[in-house]
Image (cartoon, rainbow, N blue to C red):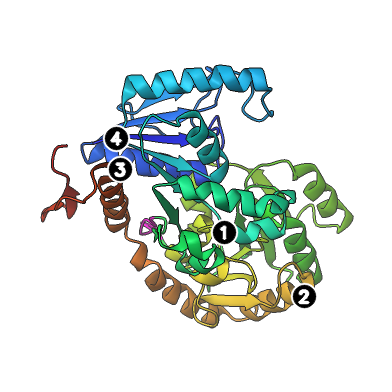
Amino acid sequence: MRVMFAARAVDRIAGGVERMLVTLMNALVARGHEVDLFTWDLASAESFYPLSREITWHRLDMGDPKVRASKRLMVHRARAIRSLIGWRKPQVIICFQDGPFRALRAYTLGLQVPIIAAERTTPDRLDHLAAGRHRELIFQSLRFAARIAIQCESYRALYPKYLQGRIVCIPNPVLPATIRADPAVPGPDGRYRLLSVGRLGFPKNYDVLIEAFARLASKFSTWDLAIVGEGEDRAGLEALRRTRGLESRVALPGTTKSITEWYSSSHMFCLPSRWEGFPNALAEALAHGLPAVGFAECAGVRDLMDDGASGLLAEGNGDPSSLALALEKVMSNGALRRSMGAKGIESVRQFDPPKIFSDWEKLSFEVAIGEAPHLRVTPAIGRPTPPSV
């Protein structure tokens, strides 16, 4: 099968959306499919995550993808994109995020190529963004999607009823951890680490985490906080760290390609996000045996975390006092951290990668040819083998 994936940009972006995009494309290539990637990136763009050499990456290279295009540029882009689709003839296009979906759907009108809108976050995000005033327009545009892929079943009810029938839920894959954390035992230096992983931007709400940790720092003198990631909020977070006198206790190491080492050497995880789609970092932390804390009113976090079992949900969304209270309960009890970590490992087994890849494979077949052929399973490796199309 010939599948084209589309995204706004992936150039050196170490985000969850980009990682899942690359992971899914690499998996479909390994299963024998022909995979193209289309982005609005410039010709010099590079992928932060390893991209299979068998994937053909088409960089539009027509203006900065971060800058709103003029009408003249939109016309030129439309011609180039239609030419590309006509040349490559994909049987189905999978668009990551609603913005690229709307653009590509408009640019390909009449070409008879079905497009799957792969939503990467909850509709609740519109409650926090200026784009919320265009909520109905965004929903109406999704009428033109062959299918709408969401990541958590609870999100279905957040869409209008006229869309719910074309929605399919496919969560992200979560790899089992090869090295697990021991949340009850301090590191070689006798210290404990509270970890968070994510982009340093508005959705992740990291100023609230630093404020909450500041309220606990004196009581938990052997604990440190590390926030692994990069983004536009770095300067503000560094300033807040200085203001709270925590420069030696709060680390902002940037991005890494060795995230497993951070998970396995930490003792607890916190994701203070305002909203999520499928919180990959939280799922990975649970897979490594880390107890977790997040906000009860954060979509995605509340879907993955079993409150009181694999972690604790703090009241509300964005209150440093409630977050500090939840953190304190877990930080003060090593036995509880170890118990929660064990339950977290079990909780993410349902996101077994081969099953998730097969779900995407089935959906692509159904959209491309109207049905999903039987996927043969090779017992030796447990990997479905698609019939040739």
Q: Nearer the viewer, mark 4 or mark 3?
A: 4
**As drawn, 324 above or below 45:** below
Magenta highlight: main SS? loop
User: Given the current orientation, which residue lies at the most extreme front position?
Assistant: 110
Which of the 4 quarters of the picture holds residue 230?
top right
Query: Is residue 384 toward the left or the right of residue 273 in the image?
Result: left
Spatial separation of the CA atoms under disc 4 and disc 3: 18 Å
Q: Secondary structure at mark 4?
A: loop
**Residue type (three-letter) at the residue carrying disc 2:** Lys
Name the one closer to the observer, 12 or 337: 12
Q: Earlier in the sequence, mark 4 or mark 1?
A: 4
Report which residue position mark 3 lands on: 27
Residue 68: x and y, percent?
69, 29
User: How many other residues sit within 10 Å of disc 4, few (<14), some (14-19) or many (≥20)?
Assistant: many
Task: Residue at 80% x, 47% y: name it.
Answer: 238
Q: Give the labeled residue for mark 4.
A: 91
What is the span of residues highlighted in magenta in the rendered image? 173-179
Magenta span contains residue 178: yes
Q: Disc 4 and disc 1: Cα gap in Å?
A: 27 Å
Dot 2 falls on a residue whose secondary structure is loop
